[in-house]
Amino acid sequence: MIKVVKFGGSSVANATQFQKVKDIVCKEKERKYIIVSACGKESFEDYKVTDLLYLCEAHIRYHVSYESLFTLVEDKYKRIKKELDLQIDLEKEFNVIKTAMDKGNITTDFLVSRGEYLTAKCMAEYIGADFVDAADIIVFDYDGEVNFEETKKRIQKIKTKNKIVIPGFYGALPNGMVKVMSRGGSDVSGSVIANVVDADMYENWTDVSGVLVADPRIIHHPMRIDYITYSELRGMSYMGANVLHDHAIFAVRQKGIPINIRNTNEPDNPGTIIVDHIDKKKDKPLAVTGIVGKRDFSIITLTKNHSSAEIGFLRKVLSIFEVYKVSIESVPITVDTFSLIIKAEAIEHYIYEIIGRIKEDIRPDEIILQEHVSLIAVVGRGMQAVPGMSGRLLSEFGRNEINIKVINQTADELCIVVGVENKDFEKAIQCIYDRFVVEEGRK
Ligand code: ASP
């Protein structure tokens, strides 16, 4: 059994967090590949190392002294070294970075990757593991895509019985130059490593005890989700649940490797397991797995007599949005009328231009713009083939006097999206939670 374990920035923010990581890693011999982020914030006022490094880069670009910023980075690692009594020669490591910055021959990617590099160096020494540089094993093609075949070959060359600590967030191009992923990319590093070593489990350690049914800023102490499928999670993340980097699912899903979201500060909590399929015999999910939502959408509703029978009508309208590079969230349709739901910020600068184009090119009988709409997605594999589910859901809105603007559900029955006025956003989430999670959970 092999586990890949990834620790996010808050899990490695200081010496106390390092100790927690060591306890977790040493508790199971299966936890062999350890991926770490750069040190995150210790408190609300603190800084993330990666943010500081990006700031250093901006200072260098504008010929402003970076020194006071880089000192903040140095101080963080020096404190960790001192408190954990490490031997690492930090001065040497800092000098390599500072010399390159002074000479102006440092790439942004190399500079901002140093947070993960330094964390991994310190962590490897602290837990008595081998350090392996991500630049030596995670290989990107020149188009920025991970080259799994080459990455697998490289990792197979590392013959060691020991645990291995690998910095997250970066790898290297075929010419050896360091390349970083997008922000939060250590999740992706963990997922890539899990894929190439054919791990049995990818543990993603963070500061929450798994995926929550709803946003804790709206629902007081929402329940944790024990099991969720990748598709459900995708629906939840798209609609605002901030769990994992979007690209982190692809590489593990391809190999059917489960992801376990765990809390470094509460290691006995089993967290949430994300899988492709859950055995139908064992799985008795509630109808609703998660409730997520986003505010501030606009709805443009078009009516044109006989348009339902006109081939290509919808395409013509959508192509106008394509010109403005605006992506459409959803398109509910009835007879001769359809609505386009769009993020308000995506069209704020050209909304009236777009409406003008639609009037000119499409000549609708009526066009209505509604603003300040929130979308709420009710996600759940337990809704599939349950007669009356949408009826019960919608009547809950009625009972709570919440007016529904739009409803959308696709035939996979995994997600029902309801649009309400922004002012009803929190209330709607609360009433669905009370009815479908609290009440039904009690039965
Ligand atoms: N340190 C990087 C960031 O802050 C990557 C990560 O933490 O996953 O985005």
Image (tube, rainbow, N blue to C red):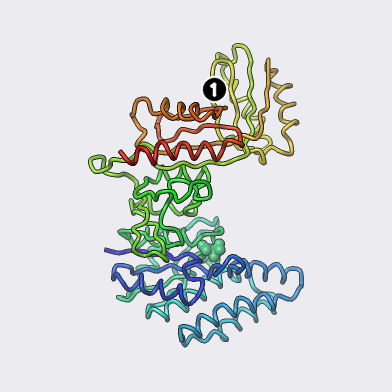
Where 33 falls versus 284 (above or below)?
below
Q: Residue 112 sits in which quadrant? A: bottom right
Q: Position of residue 48 (x, y in %)?
A: 58, 67
The residue carrying pointer 1 sits among few (fewer than 14), some (14 to 19) or many (20 or more) residues within 10 Å by Cα, namely: some
Tag 1: residue type? Ile
Where 421 falls versus 67 (above or below)?
above
Q: Quadrant of ligand 1?
A: bottom right
Q: Position of residue 28 (x, y in %)?
A: 29, 69
Where 300 falls versus 82 (above or below)?
above
Residue farthest top in this picture: 306
Can you identify the residue that label 1 sits on?
333
Q: Residue 148 sits in which quadrant? A: bottom left
Residue 366 shown left or right of residue 241 in the figure: right
Quadrant where the C terminus sits is top left
Q: Position of residue 246 (x, y in %)?
A: 49, 51
Residue 253 shown left or right of residue 185 in the figure: left
In the image, 147 versus 421, the foreground residue is 421
Residue 419 appearing in the image: yes
**What residue appears at the point 52 percent right and 69 percent down from the top-left corner?**
38
